[in-house]
Amino acid sequence: MPVPFSTALRLLIQESGMSRRCIAKRAGVHYQIVYRFMRGERMLAMDTADKILAALRVTCELKREEKT
């Protein structure tokens, strides 16, 4: 079963070895955005998620599930 995107991104951030502040700085977003996302207090806009993925040097491809 696929892992939800937000869960996968949180794991990537945790496993990156970088501080949340460093990730935010590399992504060009306010560090509070990353902190609140990691605590589950807010979701991320797709453009913000893209910036964080780029800061982590990770690419992501979204696919729509086919109806069966």
Image (tube, helix red, strand yellow):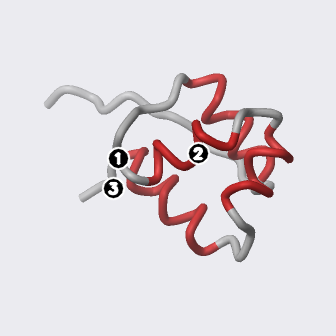
Left or right placement of residue 7 versus residue 21 in this view: left
Quick check: 57 above or below 18?
above
Write down the residue under mark 3: 3
The quarter holding residue 3 reads bottom left
Rendering coords of residue 57 (x, y %): 80, 55
Name the amino acid type tagged 1. Answer: Gly
Q: Residue 14 carries which label?
A: none
The numbered mark, 2 or 1, whose residue comes first in the sequence reads 2
Give the residue drawn at x 68%, y 34%: 50
Name the amino acid type tagged 3. Answer: Val
Left or right placement of residue 48 versus residue 63 in this view: right
Write down the residue under mark 1: 40
Rendering coords of residue 26 (x, y %): 85, 47
**Residue at the extreme front of the image, as rendered:** 32
Name the amino acid type tagged 2. Answer: Val
Quick check: 16 above or below 68?
below
Q: Which mark is residue 34?
A: 2
Give the residue drawn at x 74%, y 33%: 29
Pointer 3 and pointer 1: residues touching (CB < 8 Å)? no
Report the quarter where the N terminus lies.
bottom left
